[in-house]
Image: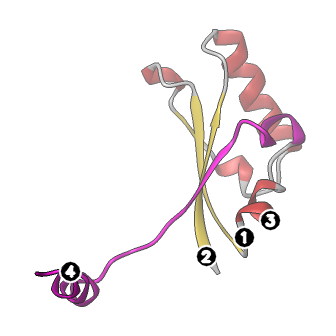
Amino acid sequence: MQRFLIEVPHEAEPIACARAAKVLLELGSHFVTHADFGCNDGDHRAWIVVEGESKAEVRNILPPPFRTAARITGLNKFSLRHLDELLQSHQA
């Protein structure tokens, strides 16, 4: 399965932070209840790393009010071998 980073923004007011966290905790799946928030550092987003088959599948684990604004990024890792091969293939 592929890993995805889900980023969910919300408004900057303290009440918006509390509402967003409450909705994610009450309505979200067990994946969403493990979200990390940046609110105390002035970055009003939640981040969650989950596994899934596709971006569409992963988006559906979010409560409906957050699905549209969420940004979902497929994650990958690099090995030194892969990077060496990539660099070698692009040398002139």
Give the residue pinned by disc 1: 54
Q: Mark number for residue 42?
A: none
Q: Nearer the viewer, mark 3 or mark 4?
A: 4
- Figure quadrant of residue 31: bottom right
Callout 1 touching callout 3 (CB < 8 Å):
yes
Q: Residues within 10 Å of mark 2 (few under 14, many from 20)?
A: few
Give the residue pinned by disc 3: 57
The correct choice, above or below, for 69 with respect to 3 in the image is: above
Type of amino acid at the residue the image marks with label 2: Gln
- Residue 57 is left or right of residue 81, and the answer is right
Which of pointers 2 and 4 lies earlier in the amino acid sequence?
2
x 43%, y 23%: residue: 41
Q: Mark 4: which secondary structure?
A: loop
Spatial CA distance of label 2 from label 1 is 8 Å
- Residue 43 is left or right of residue 52, and the answer is left
State the extent of the magenta-drawn residues as a range: 64-92
Q: Nearer the viewer, mark 2 or mark 1?
A: 1
Q: Residues within 10 Å of mark 1 (few under 14, many from 20)?
A: some
Give the residue pinned by disc 2: 2
Give 3 or 89, whichever is nearer the viewer: 89
Colour convention of the picture: secondary structure
Which of pointers 3 and 4 lies earlier in the amino acid sequence?
3
x 29%, y 83%: residue: 79
Q: Position of residue 40 (x, y in %)?
A: 49, 22
Which of pointers 2 and 1 lies earlier in the amino acid sequence?
2
Q: Mark 1: which secondary structure?
A: loop
x 25%, y 83%: residue: 86
Give the residue pinned by disc 4: 90
Q: Position of residue 76 (x, y in %)?
A: 45, 72
- Whether residue 78 appears in magenta in the rendering, the answer is yes
Q: Nearer the viewer, mark 4 or mark 1?
A: 4
